[in-house]
Image (cartoon, rainbow, N blue to C red):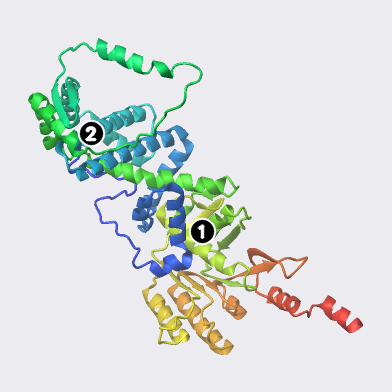
Amino acid sequence: MGGETIISVLFMNPDKENKSIYEEYKTVSEDLHLEHILKNMINETKNGNLANYFYIPLNDIDEIKYRHEIFMELEEKPSLFEGLRNFSDEMDVVKRELRFSDKIEYKYNKEGWWLEALRKYITAVNKLNLFLSQIEVSSKGLRDFYTYLKEYVESKKFIELKENFEKVRSALEEVVYCLHIDGLKVMVYKYEEEDDKEYEDEIIKTFERFKGVGYKEYDVKIPIRTGMDHVENEIINAVARLYPQHFELLDNLYTSYYQFLDRVIDRFSEEIKFYLDYLDFIKIFKEKGLKFCYPEVTKNKEDLYLYDGFDFALSYEKIRKDEPVIVNDFWVGEKERIIIVTGPNQGGKTTFARMFGQIHYLTKLGVPIPGTKAKIFLCDNIFTHFEREEKVQNLKGKLESDLLELKHILSSATSESLIILNETFSSATMSDAKFLAKNVIQKILDLDCYALYVTFIEELAFMGEKVVSMVATVSKEDPSIKTFKIIRKPADGKAYAILLAEKYGLTYEKLKRRLGA
């Protein structure tokens, strides 16, 4: 058992190859700050293995629901969360001691650490089996794993492992020896019920002076060493010669069960961390009043929405600085495909675009997403093109580079894809930028895929019923103050115009005062 069985709490079909898209998503990751999100998670959880799963998005709604079930059960049952966290931590210790054992030079030091890892493994597996037997798990992933675990604990393989371990443990408990140290000479011999009375009296007499009120503390921190030195190694080798049968049992156990970790249980101890660590990470945001939800995921072109979403990467930095986090909504109707975002510079448009992309990517990971309620389209791929600094070594002009990148995106995207564009053609003249942008939007409309386009060209928001206009707003009382709220309304240029007028002292009030003077 366990040799051919593959059970995963992350993938419904673990037999198929689940490949990382990190290499092909480098640009997307940079544009959407996905790498920032991952680094923040690793920083908080100290689990670098999260990277193994963060760039393996799902493309199947049932698989996403599979993960949602496990996440929801862990949130609803704190005791289950803690029990699985304890098991995962215990397995980390087991694997750490096994790695250490492999690096040790001396034989019995190596086998001793291996034996301790085996003891902790048996204890952890038995404890988890008992724990899960007392909690009724409901999610399919955890149910399937518990079924496997129960069968494994009751299997002949595991029972024999426990029995052989107990034989060795009992045998080694019988090993008792004495050391006689005379200068550099060390004698090792069996303990023969020797009289310790004379040593006891001498020790008591020696330490008598430390009794009483005026004693001085002599506590010394002794460094903890995990490996033997050559003297200790010679001593244990001598003990092994005194008890050959006992140590032969240890040697045989080590040889027979060197690779004792069950593959399914080992895999579970790693995969479950994805759930535990993600839920631990989002507690930071929840403590500040931010919400997370499980989106309804669809492959149909229908009404889609998100309420109270936020940029996952930026909000982490805001929380660390104790600054407020701005939340935003979006919704698109059944026939709508492209969101055009306009408004003043530094008004939150790029942040909104990143949030939009992050939400779709996190949906593909099957995790709770920022927001109170959401219905998200499961895209097959995400393409991004954000404004970047022009590199001196880039021999092509910026406009040419933009066009080549957009050509690649439009030729690679399908009707199921998501395209996010941010301030393209900023290096072109206004007339050229309008011409090129309108052509790009028409190509996207022909593809019939979803897209979000941040632009300074407001005419793009009026290219038909499939186009939605959203605007970065400013304060009604003081137009120079940006709210960082992006709302659905027709682009009218007023907010930007008022902002410019304020900047250059051309508002009605200021002009009135000047003319009056």
Q: Nearer the viewer, residue 158 or 328?
A: 158
Residue 311 at x, y percent in the picture = 54, 59
Residue name at image x 47 percent, y 65 percent: 32
Q: Does residue 176 appear to the left or right of 445 in the view shown?
A: left
Q: Nearer the viewer, residue 277 or 349?
A: 277
Residue name at image x 52 percent, y 49 percent: 293
Ranked by sequence position, the earlier of labels 2 and 1 is 2
**Quarter in which the C terminus is drawn:** bottom right
Distance CA(mark 2)–CA(mark 1): 41 Å
Which amino acid type is marked by label 1? Ala
Q: Which numbered circle lies on residue 313?
A: 1
Using the rendered view, name the quadrant where residue 35 is placed: bottom left
Q: Which numbered circle lies on residue 118?
A: 2
Residue name at image x 41 percent, y 83 percent: 394
- Residue 1 appears anywhere in the view: no
Q: Which numbered circle lies on residue 143?
A: none
| Residue lying furthest right | 516
Secondary structure of the residue carrying numbered label 2: helix
Dot 1: few (<14), some (14–19), or many (≥20) neighbours within 10 Å? many
**Quarter in which the N terminus is drawn:** top left
Residue name at image x 57 percent, y 76 percent: 455
Q: Does residue 189 appear to the left or right of 81 in the view shown?
A: left
Is residue 228 shown above or below 191?
Answer: below
Which amino acid type is marked by label 2? Leu
Do the residues under discs 2 and 1 have CB atoms within 8 angstroms? no
